[in-house]
Amino acid sequence: WGTPKSLPQIYHHANHITSSMAECKGLIQETDKAWRRMQNDDQKRLDQRVRDIQFLIKELQLKLEEVILETDALMTLQSSVVKALEGTKEPLRVTVLCLEERMKRFPAERVEDEVERELLKEQEVLKGVASLLERTVEQMSEQIRLNRSAKYHLEKDLKEKSEAQHIDNSCVVMTTHSIGNLQLSTTKSTMTPKQWENISDINIAKAEHQKTNSESMRALVQSVLEQTAADMQKQFQATTTAFQTHIQEIKSAKSQMEEKLPEILSEIFSQERLREDLQVAITENEHSLNLANTRLAMRLQRPGKEQCYDLAQAQLLTEIQHLTSHIKKLREETTQSQEQQRALVRCKLRTEEDVDMKASSLYIDEVICTQLREPVRIHTF
């Protein structure tokens, strides 16, 4: 039997198939090893990515908590500032009322005394404090807004990081059998890892900056609250002291005037008694003068040769002259006494008016203003 001509060709094909199968098995093994190696690398990269995200989440959460606590503290302090601002209204109202009440004093009493100066200064201090606290409330509102803005960006970043962590965690546990019919959309990444990390760093840095500003503002505002309260208390005490001093001065002046009144009345009565005595003396002297004139007139009726300027005649003439002079002086004294009495009466009326004015001023300062100011309290918030 001879060998078929096609047999060598069959051997050749068989050898080629055997070789191809060996190559395929090698390729399969190599592909499997490469796939497993890449799967392992993917796992490591995803695990590292999750840890990176977790680290940033912790940093963001910590900063968010700090910002929330700081914002709450600033809002609490702002409430104190609002209360302090509200607390200036009643003292200012009382100060204005006191100024208005003191304008009701008699014109002669409406002088710019120490009380007036302290009240005007008190009004200026209270208005200045109110204006400062109003600006402080506005500045705190702006800082609270900035804090909330920083909080918003932290929360937004946290939300996105949490979503990314959830997705990467899902990728970590995902297998070829768990993919199912999951439909995925592919979007080309436009951000580098450094840029990705910088987003959170920027948000954290901005939040830290606002937190620091907020802390500085709280320290400053607390100082402002303490200083303004001290300024108001100091000025309120200065005004109260001025009132007390002025009240004592008014009482002293009023007492002196009241003590002077009986003396003036006594002088008036003394002048009246003096005039009565003067009038008695004038009457007696007039009677004596009348008697002397009558005697002189009768002696002029003597016979011609008897009309002698004798000692009796000289005595009568001297007596008439003296009596006339005495009567004149007595009448002058009477007139002077009347003038003095009228002056004393005017002095009495002026003194009584002064006492009334002092009493009115005393009532305004000691009763009205003191009662208005008594309930006022300057609080430190």
Image: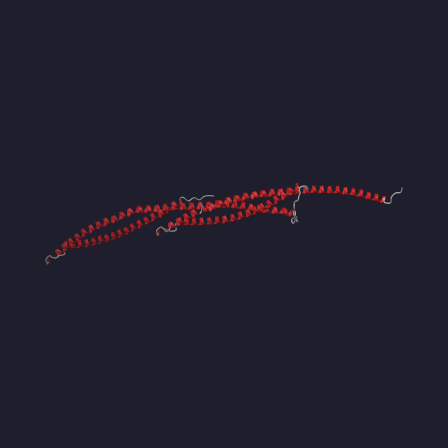
Q: Quadrant of residue 61?
A: top right
| Residue under the image location 53 percent in, 48 percent down | 145
Say how many tags the image has. 0
State the residue in front, 158 or 253: 158
| Quarter of the N terminus within the rendering | top right
Comparing 270 with 291, the one in front is 270
Instruction: Judge from the rendering whether residue 315 lies leftward or rightward of residue 6; answer left or right.
Output: left
Place residue 53 in its image quadrant: top right
* Residue at the extreme right: 1
Residue 192: % across, % down = 65, 48
Q: Is residue 328 above or below residue 245?
A: below
Q: Position of residue 157 (x, y in %)?
A: 60, 46
Q: Position of residue 258 (x, y in %)?
A: 31, 46
Side of 242 where 79 appears, left or right:
right
In the rendered view, tell whether residue 40 sits above or below residue 336: above
Instruction: Choose between 258 and 368: the one closer to the eye.
Output: 368
Taking the view exactly as shown, the residue that stands out farthest to the front is 1
Q: Is residue 96 left or right of residue 335?
A: right
Report the front residue among 83 and 39: 39
The colour scheme of the drawn protein is secondary structure
Is residue 228 visible in this depiction of the protein? Answer: no
**Residue 59: percent from the left, percent from the top?**
60, 43
Residue 265 appears in the rendering: yes
